[in-house]
Amino acid sequence: MSDQPTTSDLFRGSSAPGTAPRTPSLETPPRPAGSQGSPVATASGASTGSGVSAGPRPKSPGQLVKEITEDFSTLVRKEIDLAKQEIGSSVAVKAKGAAIVAVGALFALFALIFLLLALRDGLDEFLWTWLADIVTAVILLVIGGIAVLVARKKLAAPISADLTKQTVKEDIEWAKTLGKR
């Protein structure tokens, strides 16, 4: 598993290692020693006198929409990256498997040639030469037909992106919960 956060982590408060979460903290920062009773200025410039800060100002609707838009575009980019990575790794695994099958098939072809030559020579002892060649060709056609059927079945299996589908479903559910708030 990689160190990168999933798209779900971006909106559940988790963040990548070494970065701060996107949600702002509403806690007041600790004060330096000796400043316990000093007056604190409010946003309007007036002093509260109690030493307690009024806290951060709430964000405007425009700022909230901007943050949601940025988060959504980040989410879409992450989903696309995940899909590329997942499909790329699936294709790489299938390509390696196909290369191994091709090498094995080449050696099997050479072995088959020698077996068919031996079969032809054996049939040639009690059949006419042309009939031995036809029997050998029929055996080759049957083996080739079976190979085509097996290959067609193997290649018909789709490449899946199950992880991407699951995270997209989670993101849709998350977006639905935002609309209910």
Image: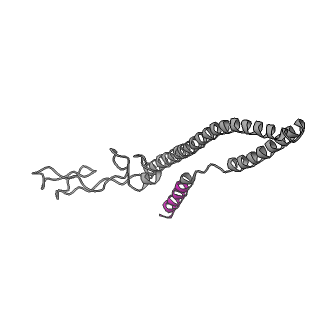
From the viewer's perspective, tell me whether residue 13 is left or right of residue 78. left
Q: Kindly give the residue lying farthest to the front in the view shown.
A: 125
Residue 141 screen position, x and y as percent: 81, 43
User: Nearest the camera: 66 or 118?
Assistant: 118
User: Nearest the camera: 121 or 35?
Assistant: 121
Instruction: Look at the image and say whether residue 168 sits in the magenta stretch.
Output: yes
Q: Kindly give the residue lying farthest to the bottom in the view shown.
A: 180
Magenta residues, start to end: 166-181
From the viewer's perspective, tell me whether residue 103 is left or right of residue 62. right
Q: How many marks?
A: 0
Residue 17 screen position, x and y as percent: 35, 46
User: Nearest the camera: 2 or 58?
Assistant: 2
Instruction: Look at the image and say whether residue 28 sits in the magenta stretch.
Output: no
Q: Measuring 80% from the left and 44% from the top, which residue is drawn there?
A: 139
Q: Measuring 46% from the left and 48% from the top, which residue is drawn there?
A: 71
Which of the 4 image quadrants contains residue 48?
Answer: bottom left
In the displayed structure, 94 sits above or below 36; it is above
User: Nearest the camera: 98 or 25?
Assistant: 98
Residue 133 screen position, x and y as percent: 85, 37
Q: Kindly give the residue lying farthest to the left in the view shown.
A: 34
From the viewer's perspective, tell me whether residue 25 is left or right of residue 162. left
Residue 116 screen position, x and y as percent: 76, 39
From the viewer's perspective, tell me whether residue 132 is left or right of residue 62. right
Considering the whole magenta stretch, tell me its main secondary structure. Answer: helix
Q: Measuring 76% from the left and 45% from the top, which residue is drawn there?
A: 143
Query: Which coloring applies here?
Result: one colour
